[in-house]
Image (tube, rainbow, N blue to C red):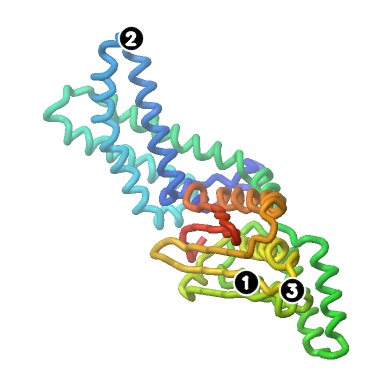
Amino acid sequence: MSIKQKARPAGRSRYPASLPDFRNLGVVLRTVVLVNALGLAAVLVRNDQIEALFGEFLDMAVRVEFPLILSVAALFLLKPLLLRLPYAGGVAVVMLLVAGVALLSGSLLAPVEVDEGPRPLVWSLVVGAIVLIYFHLRGAALAPVLAEARLLALTARIRPHFLFNSLNGVLGVLRRDPRRAEEGLEELADLFRALMQDNRELVPLSDEIALCERYLNLERLRLGDRLQVDWQRDTSAGAALVPPLLLQPLIENAVYHGIEPGAAPGPVSITIARRGAEVFITIANPLLDAESHHAGNRMALDNIRERLMLFYDLEATLDTEQDADAFRVRIRLPFRSTP
Protein backbone atom coordinates (compact mmCIF):
# COMPACT_ATOMS: atom_id res chain seq x y z
CA MET A 1 0.00 0.00 0.00
CA SER A 2 1.01 3.60 -0.47
CA ILE A 3 0.32 6.78 1.45
CA LYS A 4 -2.22 8.40 -0.86
CA GLN A 5 -1.53 12.05 -1.50
CA LYS A 6 -2.53 14.71 -3.96
CA ALA A 7 -2.03 13.57 -7.52
CA ARG A 8 -0.08 15.55 -10.05
CA PRO A 9 -2.03 17.48 -12.65
CA ALA A 10 -3.51 15.40 -15.42
CA GLY A 11 -1.29 14.92 -18.39
CA ARG A 12 2.02 15.19 -16.54
CA SER A 13 2.13 11.62 -15.36
CA ARG A 14 -0.04 8.55 -15.53
CA TYR A 15 1.04 7.54 -12.05
CA PRO A 16 -0.17 9.75 -9.17
CA ALA A 17 3.06 10.08 -7.23
CA SER A 18 2.82 8.97 -3.61
CA LEU A 19 5.18 8.17 -0.79
CA PRO A 20 5.44 4.57 0.37
CA ASP A 21 3.58 3.52 3.51
CA PHE A 22 6.43 3.65 6.02
CA ARG A 23 4.40 1.55 8.48
CA ASN A 24 4.13 -1.34 6.04
CA LEU A 25 6.37 -4.29 6.84
CA GLY A 26 7.25 -4.81 3.18
CA VAL A 27 8.28 -1.17 2.77
CA VAL A 28 10.46 -1.32 5.90
CA LEU A 29 12.17 -4.53 4.81
CA ARG A 30 12.78 -3.25 1.27
CA THR A 31 14.21 -0.02 2.65
CA VAL A 32 16.62 -1.83 4.97
CA VAL A 33 17.75 -4.24 2.25
CA LEU A 34 18.19 -1.49 -0.35
CA VAL A 35 20.19 0.82 1.93
CA ASN A 36 22.48 -2.01 3.05
CA ALA A 37 22.94 -3.12 -0.55
CA LEU A 38 23.97 0.41 -1.53
CA GLY A 39 26.39 0.50 1.41
CA LEU A 40 27.95 -2.81 0.39
CA ALA A 41 28.22 -1.62 -3.20
CA ALA A 42 29.99 1.54 -2.05
CA VAL A 43 32.49 -0.52 -0.04
CA LEU A 44 33.23 -2.79 -2.99
CA VAL A 45 33.68 0.14 -5.37
CA ARG A 46 36.11 2.10 -3.22
CA ASN A 47 38.17 -0.85 -1.94
CA ASP A 48 40.23 -3.11 -4.18
CA GLN A 49 42.02 -5.01 -1.42
CA ILE A 50 40.20 -8.21 -0.50
CA GLU A 51 41.93 -8.58 2.87
CA ALA A 52 40.58 -5.19 3.96
CA LEU A 53 36.95 -5.84 2.95
CA PHE A 54 35.87 -7.33 6.28
CA GLY A 55 37.05 -4.31 8.21
CA GLU A 56 35.41 -2.01 5.67
CA PHE A 57 32.14 -3.90 6.00
CA LEU A 58 32.21 -3.49 9.78
CA ASP A 59 32.96 0.20 9.42
CA MET A 60 30.08 0.54 6.97
CA ALA A 61 27.73 -1.20 9.41
CA VAL A 62 28.70 1.22 12.18
CA ARG A 63 28.08 4.21 9.94
CA VAL A 64 24.88 2.96 8.27
CA GLU A 65 22.81 0.82 10.65
CA PHE A 66 22.22 3.35 13.43
CA PRO A 67 21.02 6.20 11.19
CA LEU A 68 19.03 3.71 9.11
CA ILE A 69 17.14 2.34 12.10
CA LEU A 70 16.58 5.83 13.46
CA SER A 71 15.28 7.08 10.10
CA VAL A 72 12.89 4.13 9.69
CA ALA A 73 11.54 4.65 13.23
CA ALA A 74 11.07 8.38 12.65
CA LEU A 75 9.26 7.82 9.34
CA PHE A 76 7.00 5.31 11.09
CA LEU A 77 6.00 7.99 13.59
CA LEU A 78 5.64 10.70 10.95
CA LYS A 79 3.15 8.81 8.78
CA PRO A 80 0.13 10.92 9.95
CA LEU A 81 1.98 14.10 8.95
CA LEU A 82 3.00 12.67 5.57
CA LEU A 83 -0.64 11.76 4.87
CA ARG A 84 -1.60 15.43 4.99
CA LEU A 85 1.17 16.67 2.72
CA PRO A 86 1.33 16.79 -1.07
CA TYR A 87 3.95 14.57 -2.66
CA ALA A 88 6.58 17.33 -3.02
CA GLY A 89 6.11 18.34 0.61
CA GLY A 90 6.37 14.74 1.74
CA VAL A 91 9.60 14.25 -0.19
CA ALA A 92 11.02 17.42 1.36
CA VAL A 93 10.16 16.21 4.87
CA VAL A 94 11.75 12.81 4.22
CA MET A 95 14.95 14.36 2.86
CA LEU A 96 15.17 16.83 5.76
CA LEU A 97 14.72 13.95 8.18
CA VAL A 98 17.47 11.95 6.46
CA ALA A 99 19.80 14.95 6.60
CA GLY A 100 19.01 15.56 10.28
CA VAL A 101 19.62 11.95 11.20
CA ALA A 102 22.91 11.95 9.26
CA LEU A 103 24.10 15.06 11.13
CA LEU A 104 23.02 13.60 14.48
CA SER A 105 24.78 10.31 13.76
CA GLY A 106 27.90 12.16 12.65
CA SER A 107 28.01 14.20 15.84
CA LEU A 108 27.65 11.08 17.99
CA LEU A 109 30.45 9.31 16.12
CA ALA A 110 32.70 12.39 15.98
CA PRO A 111 34.79 11.44 19.07
CA VAL A 112 35.77 8.07 17.54
CA GLU A 113 35.79 8.83 13.82
CA VAL A 114 38.02 10.86 11.55
CA ASP A 115 36.31 14.00 10.28
CA GLU A 116 35.20 13.28 6.71
CA GLY A 117 33.52 16.62 6.09
CA PRO A 118 30.19 16.65 4.28
CA ARG A 119 30.65 13.23 2.64
CA PRO A 120 28.40 11.25 5.08
CA LEU A 121 25.67 13.87 4.69
CA VAL A 122 25.87 13.79 0.89
CA TRP A 123 25.88 9.99 0.88
CA SER A 124 22.78 9.89 3.11
CA LEU A 125 20.92 12.33 0.86
CA VAL A 126 21.85 10.38 -2.26
CA VAL A 127 20.73 7.08 -0.71
CA GLY A 128 17.50 8.68 0.52
CA ALA A 129 16.78 9.93 -2.99
CA ILE A 130 17.51 6.50 -4.47
CA VAL A 131 15.11 4.85 -2.02
CA LEU A 132 12.32 7.29 -2.89
CA ILE A 133 12.95 6.84 -6.61
CA TYR A 134 12.84 3.06 -6.18
CA PHE A 135 9.45 3.15 -4.47
CA HIS A 136 8.15 5.64 -7.04
CA LEU A 137 9.18 3.34 -9.89
CA ARG A 138 7.78 0.33 -8.08
CA GLY A 139 4.48 2.13 -7.60
CA ALA A 140 4.41 3.18 -11.23
CA ALA A 141 4.91 -0.45 -12.24
CA LEU A 142 1.77 -1.44 -10.32
CA ALA A 143 -0.45 1.56 -11.01
CA PRO A 144 -2.59 2.83 -12.48
CA VAL A 145 -3.28 0.79 -15.59
CA LEU A 146 -1.48 -2.40 -14.57
CA ALA A 147 -2.67 -2.46 -10.97
CA GLU A 148 -6.26 -1.60 -11.88
CA ALA A 149 -6.33 -4.27 -14.57
CA ARG A 150 -4.89 -6.87 -12.21
CA LEU A 151 -7.24 -5.95 -9.38
CA LEU A 152 -10.27 -6.06 -11.63
CA ALA A 153 -9.14 -9.36 -13.17
CA LEU A 154 -8.31 -10.84 -9.78
CA THR A 155 -11.61 -9.77 -8.23
CA ALA A 156 -13.38 -13.09 -7.88
CA ARG A 157 -16.51 -13.66 -9.92
CA ILE A 158 -19.36 -15.89 -8.85
CA ARG A 159 -19.52 -19.08 -10.88
CA PRO A 160 -22.07 -18.93 -13.73
CA HIS A 161 -23.91 -21.97 -12.42
CA PHE A 162 -24.69 -20.10 -9.21
CA LEU A 163 -27.09 -17.73 -11.02
CA PHE A 164 -29.08 -20.60 -12.51
CA ASN A 165 -29.09 -22.55 -9.26
CA SER A 166 -30.30 -19.51 -7.35
CA LEU A 167 -33.10 -18.82 -9.82
CA ASN A 168 -34.14 -22.47 -9.66
CA GLY A 169 -34.12 -22.23 -5.87
CA VAL A 170 -36.36 -19.16 -6.01
CA LEU A 171 -38.75 -20.94 -8.39
CA GLY A 172 -38.80 -23.93 -6.07
CA VAL A 173 -40.21 -21.90 -3.14
CA LEU A 174 -42.28 -19.42 -5.19
CA ARG A 175 -45.62 -21.15 -4.71
CA ARG A 176 -45.31 -22.37 -1.15
CA ASP A 177 -43.48 -19.30 0.23
CA PRO A 178 -43.79 -16.21 -2.03
CA ARG A 179 -42.27 -13.96 0.61
CA ARG A 180 -39.09 -16.08 0.80
CA ALA A 181 -38.88 -16.12 -3.00
CA GLU A 182 -39.05 -12.32 -3.01
CA GLU A 183 -36.30 -12.13 -0.38
CA GLY A 184 -34.20 -14.50 -2.47
CA LEU A 185 -34.48 -12.24 -5.52
CA GLU A 186 -33.52 -9.22 -3.40
CA GLU A 187 -30.48 -11.09 -2.04
CA LEU A 188 -29.47 -12.11 -5.56
CA ALA A 189 -29.76 -8.49 -6.71
CA ASP A 190 -27.62 -7.29 -3.78
CA LEU A 191 -25.00 -9.91 -4.56
CA PHE A 192 -24.66 -8.98 -8.21
CA ARG A 193 -24.77 -5.28 -7.39
CA ALA A 194 -21.66 -5.83 -5.27
CA LEU A 195 -19.98 -7.60 -8.20
CA MET A 196 -20.67 -4.69 -10.54
CA GLN A 197 -19.22 -2.04 -8.23
CA ASP A 198 -15.74 -0.54 -8.58
CA ASN A 199 -13.84 -3.15 -6.60
CA ARG A 200 -10.48 -1.39 -6.29
CA GLU A 201 -10.95 0.22 -2.86
CA LEU A 202 -10.93 -1.47 0.52
CA VAL A 203 -14.30 -2.02 2.20
CA PRO A 204 -15.30 -2.73 5.83
CA LEU A 205 -15.16 -6.38 6.80
CA SER A 206 -18.70 -6.05 8.17
CA ASP A 207 -19.94 -5.34 4.62
CA GLU A 208 -18.19 -8.47 3.37
CA ILE A 209 -19.83 -10.51 6.14
CA ALA A 210 -23.27 -9.15 5.25
CA LEU A 211 -22.68 -10.03 1.59
CA CYS A 212 -21.68 -13.58 2.54
CA GLU A 213 -24.82 -13.97 4.65
CA ARG A 214 -26.92 -13.08 1.59
CA TYR A 215 -25.00 -15.59 -0.48
CA LEU A 216 -25.48 -18.36 2.09
CA ASN A 217 -29.21 -17.59 2.33
CA LEU A 218 -29.46 -18.13 -1.41
CA GLU A 219 -27.59 -21.41 -1.22
CA ARG A 220 -29.99 -22.62 1.48
CA LEU A 221 -32.84 -22.30 -1.01
CA ARG A 222 -31.53 -25.32 -2.91
CA LEU A 223 -29.34 -27.12 -0.32
CA GLY A 224 -31.74 -26.76 2.59
CA ASP A 225 -30.62 -28.42 5.82
CA ARG A 226 -27.59 -29.93 4.10
CA LEU A 227 -25.88 -26.56 4.45
CA GLN A 228 -24.94 -25.85 8.07
CA VAL A 229 -22.97 -22.68 8.81
CA ASP A 230 -21.11 -22.01 12.04
CA TRP A 231 -20.22 -18.31 12.41
CA GLN A 232 -17.77 -17.24 15.12
CA ARG A 233 -17.35 -13.48 14.80
CA ASP A 234 -15.42 -10.91 16.78
CA THR A 235 -17.48 -7.73 16.47
CA SER A 236 -14.39 -5.55 16.94
CA ALA A 237 -12.98 -6.93 13.66
CA GLY A 238 -15.91 -5.63 11.61
CA ALA A 239 -14.37 -2.19 11.11
CA ALA A 240 -11.24 -3.60 9.46
CA LEU A 241 -10.81 -2.62 5.82
CA VAL A 242 -10.37 -5.58 3.47
CA PRO A 243 -10.25 -6.13 -0.31
CA PRO A 244 -13.78 -6.40 -1.76
CA LEU A 245 -15.10 -9.89 -2.37
CA LEU A 246 -12.45 -11.42 -0.14
CA LEU A 247 -14.67 -13.84 1.76
CA GLN A 248 -17.47 -14.70 -0.68
CA PRO A 249 -15.34 -16.65 -3.18
CA LEU A 250 -13.77 -18.68 -0.36
CA ILE A 251 -17.15 -19.46 1.17
CA GLU A 252 -18.51 -20.34 -2.26
CA ASN A 253 -15.60 -22.75 -2.70
CA ALA A 254 -16.37 -24.29 0.68
CA VAL A 255 -20.01 -24.85 -0.31
CA TYR A 256 -19.21 -25.97 -3.85
CA HIS A 257 -16.56 -28.54 -2.86
CA GLY A 258 -17.55 -29.42 0.69
CA ILE A 259 -21.37 -29.47 0.78
CA GLU A 260 -22.83 -29.70 -2.73
CA PRO A 261 -21.26 -33.05 -3.77
CA GLY A 262 -22.40 -34.85 -0.61
CA ALA A 263 -25.78 -36.24 0.34
CA ALA A 264 -25.50 -35.72 4.09
CA PRO A 265 -25.54 -32.41 5.99
CA GLY A 266 -22.15 -30.76 6.38
CA PRO A 267 -20.80 -27.77 8.29
CA VAL A 268 -19.03 -24.72 6.90
CA SER A 269 -17.14 -23.03 9.73
CA ILE A 270 -16.23 -19.33 9.49
CA THR A 271 -14.14 -17.80 12.27
CA ILE A 272 -13.23 -14.10 12.35
CA ALA A 273 -11.12 -12.80 15.23
CA ARG A 274 -9.10 -9.72 16.00
CA ARG A 275 -5.89 -10.03 17.99
CA GLY A 276 -4.32 -6.67 18.61
CA ALA A 277 -3.35 -5.06 15.31
CA GLU A 278 -4.19 -8.12 13.19
CA VAL A 279 -7.34 -9.87 11.95
CA PHE A 280 -7.47 -13.65 11.53
CA ILE A 281 -10.03 -15.39 9.29
CA THR A 282 -10.47 -19.16 9.03
CA ILE A 283 -12.90 -20.91 6.66
CA ALA A 284 -13.26 -24.69 6.96
CA ASN A 285 -15.39 -27.22 5.08
CA PRO A 286 -15.69 -31.02 4.87
CA LEU A 287 -13.26 -32.62 2.42
CA LEU A 288 -15.27 -35.02 0.27
CA ASP A 289 -12.80 -35.42 -2.61
CA ALA A 290 -9.26 -34.22 -1.86
CA GLU A 291 -7.98 -34.25 -5.45
CA SER A 292 -10.86 -32.40 -7.10
CA HIS A 293 -11.06 -29.92 -4.24
CA HIS A 294 -7.38 -29.01 -4.51
CA ALA A 295 -7.57 -28.59 -8.29
CA GLY A 296 -10.74 -26.55 -8.17
CA ASN A 297 -9.52 -24.11 -5.54
CA ARG A 298 -6.00 -23.39 -6.76
CA MET A 299 -6.89 -20.49 -9.07
CA ALA A 300 -9.23 -18.78 -6.58
CA LEU A 301 -6.71 -19.06 -3.76
CA ASP A 302 -3.85 -17.78 -5.91
CA ASN A 303 -5.96 -14.83 -7.07
CA ILE A 304 -6.93 -13.82 -3.55
CA ARG A 305 -3.37 -14.28 -2.32
CA GLU A 306 -2.15 -11.92 -5.04
CA ARG A 307 -4.85 -9.37 -4.20
CA LEU A 308 -3.74 -9.42 -0.57
CA MET A 309 -0.17 -8.82 -1.73
CA LEU A 310 -1.25 -5.85 -3.86
CA PHE A 311 -3.19 -4.25 -1.03
CA TYR A 312 -1.04 -5.14 2.01
CA ASP A 313 2.37 -6.18 0.66
CA LEU A 314 4.02 -8.54 3.18
CA GLU A 315 1.65 -7.74 6.04
CA ALA A 316 -1.02 -10.24 4.92
CA THR A 317 -0.86 -13.99 4.32
CA LEU A 318 -3.16 -16.72 3.02
CA ASP A 319 -2.41 -20.34 3.91
CA THR A 320 -4.28 -23.60 3.48
CA GLU A 321 -4.41 -26.73 5.60
CA GLN A 322 -5.80 -30.11 4.68
CA ASP A 323 -6.33 -33.14 6.90
CA ALA A 324 -8.25 -36.37 6.51
CA ASP A 325 -11.73 -34.84 6.53
CA ALA A 326 -11.46 -31.03 6.35
CA PHE A 327 -9.98 -28.26 4.22
CA ARG A 328 -9.14 -24.91 5.84
CA VAL A 329 -8.16 -21.51 4.51
CA ARG A 330 -6.47 -19.13 6.94
CA ILE A 331 -6.01 -15.42 6.28
CA ARG A 332 -3.99 -12.98 8.36
CA LEU A 333 -4.15 -9.29 7.59
CA PRO A 334 -3.49 -6.01 9.43
CA PHE A 335 -6.35 -4.26 11.19
CA ARG A 336 -6.80 -0.91 9.50
CA SER A 337 -9.95 1.14 9.89
CA THR A 338 -8.75 4.01 7.67
CA PRO A 339 -7.31 3.80 4.14
Q: Position of residue 251 (x, y in %)?
A: 65, 65
What residue is drawn where x is 32% and y is 42%? Answer: 71
Which kind of residue does numbered mark 1 sit on? Pro
Residue 297 % position (x, y): 68, 53
Task: Residue at 71% x, 73% y: name it.
Answer: 264
Of badges 3 and 2, the one in the foreground is 3
Marks 2 and 1, how far apart at CA? 67 Å
Asked if 199 appears above or below 291 in the picture, the reply is below
Evaluate if marks 2 and 1 touch, with contact meaning CB atoms under 8 Å apart: no
Which residue reaches farthest top? 49
SS state under label 3: helix
How many angstroms separate mark 3 from mark 2 (CA)? 70 Å
Q: Which residue is mark 2?
A: 48
**Residue 55 % position (x, y):** 23, 19
Q: Are marks 1 and 3 in contact (CB under 8 Å)?
A: no
Label 3: how many Cα within 10 Å (few below 14, some 14–19, many 20+): many
* Number of marks in the rendered image: 3
Residue placed under numbered mark 1 in the picture: 267
Q: Residue at x 78, y 86 (%)?
A: 180
Q: Reading the chain from its start, which is encountered first: label 1 or label 3? A: 3
Question: Relative to 296, is 224 above or below?
Answer: below
Between discs 3 and 2, the one toward the N terminus: 2
Drawn side of residue 241 relative to residue 168, left or right: left
Q: Which of the 4 quarters of the picture holds residue 293?
A: bottom right
Q: Which residue is mark 3?
A: 219
Which quadrant of the figure has residue 66? top left
Query: Considering the numbered disc 2 on the image, is that residue within a helix, a strand or a loop?
Result: loop
30 and 253: which is toward the camera: 253
- Name the side, left or right, on which 157 lies relative to 204: right
Residue type, label 3: Glu
